[in-house]
Every structure is written in structure tokens, then in C-alpha cells.
Image (tube, helix red, strand yellow):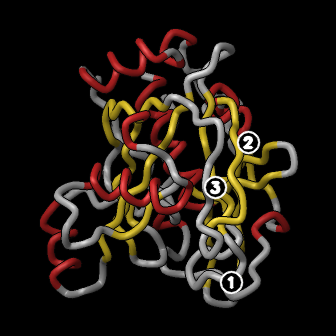
Amino acid sequence: MTKTPNPADYAMNVAAPPGFDAQAVPIHEVRSHEKKVASELLLPSGLRARFQSPPPWQPEITDENRHVIASDIIAKRQAAGKVTKAAVLIPLILKEDGLSVLLTQRTNHLHDHAGQISFPGGRMDTEDQSPVDTALRESKEEIGLESGRVEIIGHLPQYLTVSGYSVTPVVGLVQAQAEYVLDAFEVADVFEVPLSFLLDPANHQVRVWQSEQGGRRFYSIPYENRFIWGATAGMLRNLYHLLKV
């Protein structure tokens, strides 16, 4: 059984400074010893079945993924104005050679997570009835993804980020579009990564950044010339945990 890292070993509220280069942080370990996801669970039918009848499993708790187990804790933080509700879409693109994940590269001038790789999504608006509404609306606004192409199959537990967002990852199977229309203010680029690559623990790196205020531990998943890390990598780790059991 894989030992879940203890976030108490690190300073959980240490935020990265402006211009922080996550890729320069040393690799602490690679999770190649962990169980691989069964190939049938990387298929649309396997994913649908797993989300419909999930086995007992636990989200991984790390500095980047400060999952709040008790709902009353998250409610108190929301009441105090310390948490912003948000949702993202994890778009699994249906392809002949297997599923791939559509990711966005954020523009460099944004206030939060500038230049980072993320899923399409954002904060919930008052008119949004559910995280699914938010995820689909934001995906349409950010990359022009038509909601009619998306089959929602489930969601992952809320993910509390260092920047104060409580994010619900919504998982959907997507019929690929010929072209994506990007919001030039928020999105610099879109690209795909094979789901099998992203969920292979041999590609999951643990990095530990040390500063005068303490340490911070986060996951990274390099792919070709892209560097996926932080909350995006953490949400992918939780998808991995759901499927590996």
C-alpha cells in the first residue's frame, strides 16, 4: 500500500514568490514504484463504470492539494471569505488511438498562476447552478468548447489550492473540435497529452522547494516541452488514485 505523504512535514501555507521557476526545483522522488492503472480503465467504458460505481478511495493530501475532509471546515472557511468556489473541466478527448487530455497554457500576465498549465475553468458565477455549469461555461469562454460535445461522467473531490480556491474537477468525455477559439486574455495555447502518460506514476515527480519561511512539496509531470505542475498535477494524481484501486 502506498504511503500517503504527510503535509505536516512541510509548511502548508508557503506561497511561491513572483517569478517562481517550478521546473528548477530539485526532484525529490519519482513515484514509479506505485501501481499502474489497468488498461481497461483508460477506456471510455471503463471510466464511465468507475465513476458510476467508485470503490473506496482517498484523495492524496499534499501541500498543493489541501483536500478538506470535513465539510464543516470548508463551510467555515467559505463563510469567512477565505475560499473562492471554482470548477474546472478535465476534458478527455475521444481519439482512435486512445484518450487524451486537453490542457491550456495560461497567459503570462494573469494575476493567479500566470503562464502555468491548467484545465479550462474558473470561479463560479452566481448564475451557475452547479460545478458542471461553471466548468462548461468557462470551457466555452476560454477555448470555445461546445457543451454539446461533452459527456459529463463524474467529478473528483474538491481541491483547495494555495491561492484560496476550492476547485471541483468535473470529468467529461469530449468529441474533439476541429478548432478551438481561445480567449486571448487568459489562454496562450491549448494542447493534448495522452491520458495513459498522465496517469502513469512513473511520470509523477515529487519536488520540494525550500525557502526561509519553510518548504513546499508539489507534483510535476513534464511532457515534451511542457511542464505540468501544482494543482493541475495534483488533480491528475487524484484521478490516478481513483482509477488505480
> Who's the residue at 46% across and 54% down the image?
139
Q: Position of residue 211 (x, y in %)?
A: 70, 84
SS state under label 1: loop
In the picture, measured across the screen, residue 119 lies left or right of residue 20, that is left
112 or 152, nearer to the observer = 152
> Who's the residue at 24% across and 20% down the image?
53
Around disc 2, counting alpha carbons within 10 Å, would you say few (fewer than 14), some (14 to 19), or many (20 or more)? some
In the picture, measured across the screen, residue 137 lies left or right of residue 20, that is left
Gap between marks 3 and 1, in whole Å? Answer: 15 Å
Residue 66 higher or lower than 14, as above or below:
above
* Residue type marked 2: Val
Mark 3 or 1, nearer chain start: 3
> Who's the residue at 59% across and 51% down the image?
233
* Contact check, label 3 and label 2, Cβ < 8 Å: no
SS state under label 3: strand
> Who's the residue at 30% across and 68% down the image?
124
In the picture, measured across the screen, residue 158 lies left or right of residue 174, that is left
Q: Which residue is mark 2?
A: 30
In the picture, measured across the screen, residue 26 lies left or right of residue 39, that is right
Tag count in the figure?
Answer: 3
* Residue type marked 1: His
Q: Which residue is mark 3?
A: 104
* Contact check, label 2 and label 1, Cβ < 8 Å: no
* Residue type marked 3: Thr
Q: Quadrant of residue 88?
A: bottom left
Q: Which residue is mark 1?
A: 109
Residue 82 higher or lower than 24, as above or below:
below
Q: Position of residue 31 (x, y in %)?
A: 67, 38
